[in-house]
Amino acid sequence: WVTKQNNRRVELGKKVTLLRGISIIIGTIIGAGIFISPKGILKHTGSVGMSLIVWIACGVLSLFGALSYAELGTCIKKSGGHYTYIMEAFGPQMAFIRLWADLIAIRPAATAVISLAFGQYILEPLFMPCDIPPMAVKLATAIGITSVMYLNSMSVTWTARIQIFLTFSKLLAIAIIIVPGLYQLFKGETRNFDNAFELTNVKLSGMPLAFYSGMYAYAGWFYLNFVTEEVDNPERTVPLAISISMLVVTSCYVLTNVAYYTVMTAEELLASDAVAVTFAEKMMGNFSIAVPVFVALSCYGSMNGGLFAYSRMFYVASREGHLPEVLSMIHVRRHTPLTAVFILYPMTILQLFVGDIYSLLNFMSFLRWLFIGVVVLGLIYLRYTKPDLPRPFKVPLFIPVVFCLTCFFMVFLSLYSDPVNTGIGFAIALTGIPAYYIFIYYNHRPKWIQRVLDSSAHMKLEQTD
């Protein structure tokens, strides 16, 4: 349900244009990873040439997934992303399990991790060359999380404008790396590419882990599908925004790695804790102090775009009856899903100060690919069960098939390489089954929980007014 004022429905407006859609996708995909740790792929492939091939291949595979989601986004014009598509294809129980895993663990942990990177890098210029006190990082992180949530609760328009600014900031940061690197390359600095495909160093056993790292670096292409109802002309905007974004991100990632290898040897890159900072120190001297600031802005963009998207999933889940009704309330004047924005705040702050976030992310990384695989499997399933469903944008069948097999291969890889953490993550997700029957199916939702959630949400709305 939505609030009403003067008998007029208060709804989320269609304020996501093509440029804003592109900024949501690019701004959320490009976080801290490309600036800090491209060495994971190099370590697992064993050669410069093979690492570049993996970066390109992961970009193409991610494009396959993104195009599959573009088809889903144009034929199922509801916000909510993974949750909505699983609901349409496989029913409410499977959708609730996905929602449950997101709510209690995946999203708070993922938000806390990218926010910690923000806190670390925003303080680095102030403390160089000393170490930053851990509590200072956590306090800066908490301020960052709070500001992102406040921004998202105040205005969709300003959230989108700031996202565009942050996206251009991170593209500028990448350009600062790519342009000098390519300049050196065109001057003839190619010695680090000699024997780039030396097969004696290539590790076939490490290739699956290299692909796993690469696919993780590209993750985020699905975020526009979480806000489909707010996209202006989704039949055109969703496929176009996804295609342009993936082309830009893949080009940036590959060219950034080429720039790194032009200036650094493979050994130097593997020894570096923050590749972009090492690159900047070699190329720019004192200007390298600006790099941590750009990395912090990049992380802030990922925080902002992720929260904007995921709050819509909780809003839609509430509308479907899977979360308390108050989460589907929209602020009368600001037209933002205020309570859906703030639902993650307590859990995120709690995990930030008391939880072992990185181990929790290990539990959950395979669940992300399992459910994305299930969503794309749902696309193939809907092709046969609902052949008459209008599909303004339709991809060839081999695209979702290849991507679906890739997802399930990565799930199998997780089970093989880390069975304990994967098993714990799977067990956490399975707690969604009893939760579904207790709170949803039998409709025995504890009234005291409902009253507390409703009253706290009403208080927040009154305070914001």
Image (cartoon, rainbow, N blue to C red):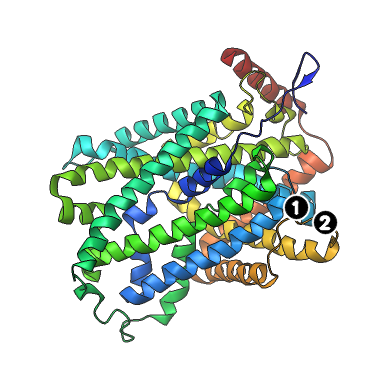
Q: Which element carries disc 1, helix, strand or loop?
A: helix
Q: Residue furthest bottom?
A: 200
Q: Which element carries disc 2, helix, strand or loop?
A: loop
| Count of numbered badges drawn on the protein | 2
Which mark is on residue 25?
Answer: none
Q: Which residue does the numbered mark 1 point to in the structure image? A: 75
Quadrant of the image containing the C terminus: top right
Classify residue 47 by image quadrant: bottom left
Instruction: Identify the residue at horizontal 18%, vertical 44% (top origin).
Output: 287
Q: Residues within 10 Å of mark 1 (few under 14, many from 20)?
A: some
Instruction: Identify the residue at horizontal 38%, vertical 48% (top origin).
Output: 171
Picture coordinates of residue 38 (x, y %)? 35, 61
Is 327 displayed left or right of 416 in the figure?
Answer: right
Instruction: Note whether 125 is above or below 4 in the view shown.
Output: below
Picture coordinates of residue 399 (x, y %)? 64, 69
Whether pointer 1 and pointer 2 mark residues with C-beta atoms closer than 8 Å, the reply is yes
Quadrant of the image containing the N terminus: top right
Instruction: Note whether 28 is above or below 383 in the view shown.
Output: above
From where the camera sits, is residue 431 visible? no
Classify residue 54 by image quadrant: bottom left
Q: Nearer the viewer, residue 375 or 298?
A: 298
Q: Residues within 10 Å of mark 2 (few under 14, many from 20)?
A: few
Q: Which residue does the numbered mark 2 point to in the structure image? A: 389
Picture coordinates of residue 340 (x, y %)? 63, 32
Q: Nearer the viewer, residue 191 or 347?
A: 191
Picture coordinates of residue 430 (x, y %)? 67, 54
Instruction: Identify the residue at horizontal 58%, vertical 56% (top origin).
Output: 368
Classify residue 136 by image quadrant: top left
Is 313 displayed left or right of 414 in the figure?
Answer: right
**CA–CA distance in space, label 1 to label 2:** 7 Å
Q: For the residue marked with disc 1, what is the amino acid?
A: Cys
